[in-house]
Image (spheres, rainbow, N blue to C red):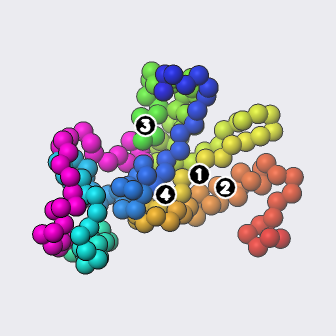
Amino acid sequence: SSGVKIPWYAVFGNHDDSIQGTLPSDWGLLKTMYISDRKITGFASDNDTKAYLQAAQGNGPVALSNDTVSLTRQITADERRVPFTPFEFIKAHLRDGVNGSGPHGHGFSEDDLNAVRGYYTFSIANGVTGISLDSTNRAGYTDGSIDDRQWKWLKSVLRAGSSVYYDDLGV
């Protein structure tokens, strides 16, 4: 972002990880959908929607009716339009020469890359800490979540920056 003159920070979210933030990023059919010459714009029937969701959850092939073709549109196929992993997203922000107005990595560090950790803290001002969370549900679906490792990290960050801290039970 060469035109941005202020520091900016990147956050890895569910729409970066999966199509519309709802399907798992490591699902093989997803890559095919991204690079193909067709874009799905909807489903012709409730049965087609159910068949597609079952396939997305790993419960068999996509068995759609012939009517579904009318709910796609022709686009230019592009092999470069592949989904990327959290590792690739973080690595792209750490490349030399892509700092813009900074900071280098836009919040991500080499440690984050090595641990494939999409959450971090950053200083906003003296005594004010920004917290970036990665609430992507790696299994897909639209509801965000954080794993136990990130939850423990978040609690430690909140404890470190708080004069008063209440635990999970409000005590």
Residue span colored magenta: 61-88
Which sits in the foreground, 162 or 22? 22
Q: Which residue lies furthest to the bottom in this view?
A: 47
In the rendered image, which residue does mark 4 sit on? 136
Which sits in the foreground, 76 or 80? 76
Helix, strand, or loop for circle 3? helix
- The mark nearer the N terminus, 2 or 3, is 3
Helix, strand, or loop for circle 4? loop
Q: Circles 2 and 3: CB distance less than 8 Å?
A: no
Image spot of residue 83 (x, y percent):
32, 48
- The mark nearer the N terminus, 3 or 4, is 3
Q: Circles 4 and 1: CB distance less than 8 Å?
A: no
Which sits in the foreground, 137 or 39? 39
Q: Name which residue type carries label 3.
A: Lys
Q: In this view, does 70 lie above or below 37?
A: below
Helix, strand, or loop for circle 1? loop
Q: How far apart are marks 1 and 3 (CA)?
A: 17 Å
Q: Distance between the residues labelled 2 and 3?
A: 23 Å
Q: Name which residue type carries label 4.
A: Thr
